[in-house]
Amino acid sequence: MKLLYISSRDVFVKHHGGFQCTNRNYLSFCELIGSDNIEVINLVEKKLPLHRSILKRLYLLLGFYWGLTPGKLKNIINISQKYDYVFIDQSFYGVIAWYLKRSNYKGKIICFFHNVEYNIQCQRTKANPLRIWNILIMYYNEKKACKYSDKLVVLNKRDCMELQRIYGVTKISIIPISLADTFKSEVTELTSSPSTLIFIGNNWLPNIHGLKWFVSNVLDHVDIKLQIVGTGMDVLKEKFKHPKIEFLGYIPDLSQILSKADYVLSPIFIGGGMKVKTCESLMYGKNIIGTKEAFEGYDLDYQKAGALCNNKEEFIHTINNYCSVKREKFNEYSRNCFLAKYSFQATLKNFDDLLSN
């Protein structure tokens, strides 16, 4: 069995959520059929000369997005004949499925939806109306993906229902986010006073939106230290000159900083898919204070894993209540949820089913 893996990312890079999910997908197939039977095509080039950059914009008229060009598409069509499966790691490459079917490709096409990109672009367009063309590109590609892929995969039930609502498809597989277990040892310490809450996330609209909301509405009403970790989050330094905030920048290995933190904070209100930071927090056995969006797709008891908060009053009350007494930093329930449902081994059968059915 051979598989052609098409991605917008380096499958070996794990900088943040989307990359980690792509890496998980790739390694799952490697585990099942062997890396020698997988060829990866990374469509995105880091730097383009001026004339190529102009062509890139013209390609949008064909529905080609994020590095896809007529030349690369031709290459995909030519080499696809050697493979039993073509795995498209992003739904905004859905047009590839259409062209493969037109070229009489005999294998199976699987398209993985990291989220419903159409919905994400609608959210972004509210912040920047000039990006409205992205909505059209995403709808066009996702429509093609849904019509011409043999199998569709989403991260959670919500995205499954959204694909049904927007595109009218019914046969969809759900494979939740999962991570390789890098947890080393249980931290038996009690929380400190004032407590340290850690926010993990890169410079992405839902993260920026959630942090701005929390700092504006909650931070002055709670006695905590807030640590912000993530690529590009230093852009908030000038705006958030607050004595309770510490910017730590990008940290390759989160194990120590996560273990030391008293609680994980996740005030996310917009977005799609599943939040990888929640999976990482469960892995390290953390208490998580987050919104419904932060926990979206996770099958767990919010109160046992931490607390569910969706407005200013709930965040203030919960944090003040949690931080008023010493608690165990390590949450055994969170850790067990990770092992049972969101570890790499836990979702491997789901990928096996994709190739078997």
Image: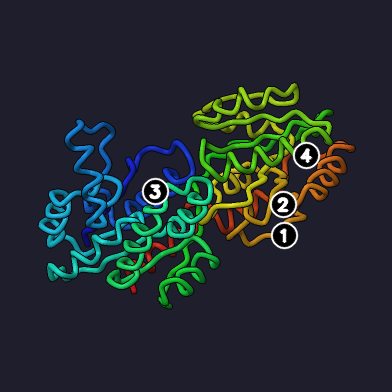
Provide residue 8's location: percent of width, then percent of height. 32, 46
Looking at the picture, how far across and down is residue 221, in whole percent? Answer: 84, 36
| Residue under label 3 | 22
Residue 301 seen in the figure? yes
Inspect the image, locate mark 1, and give the three-letter code of the amino acid beneath it: Asp
- Amino acid at circle 4: Val
Q: Earlier in the sequence, mark 4 or mark 1?
A: 4
Dot 3 or dot 2, earlier in sequence: 3
Q: Give the image quarter of residue 163.
A: bottom left
Residue drawn 35% across the image and 50% down it: 26
| Numbered tag placed on residue 305 in the rendering | 2
Q: Nearer the viewer, mark 4 or mark 1?
A: 4
Location of residue 239 in the rendering, given as x and y in whole percent from the top left corner: 63, 26
Say which of 188 and 137 sits in front: 137
The answer to whether marks 2 and 1 mark residues whose Cβ atoms lie closer than 8 Å is yes
Work out whether residue 42 can be spotted.
no
Instruction: Give the mark toward the camera: 3 or 2.
Output: 3
Point out the tag, 2 or 4, that comes first from the N-terminus. Answer: 4
Q: Quadrant of residue 353?
A: bottom left
Quadrant location of the N terminus in the rendered image: bottom left
In terms of secondary structure, where does tag 1 sit? loop
**Three-letter amino acid code of the residue under disc 2:** Ala
Q: Amino acid at mark 3?
A: Thr
Residue 225 image point, x, y percent: 75, 28
Label 3–label 4 contact, CB within 8 A: no
Report the side of 95 relative to 221 (left or right).
Answer: left
Residue occupied by mark 1: 301
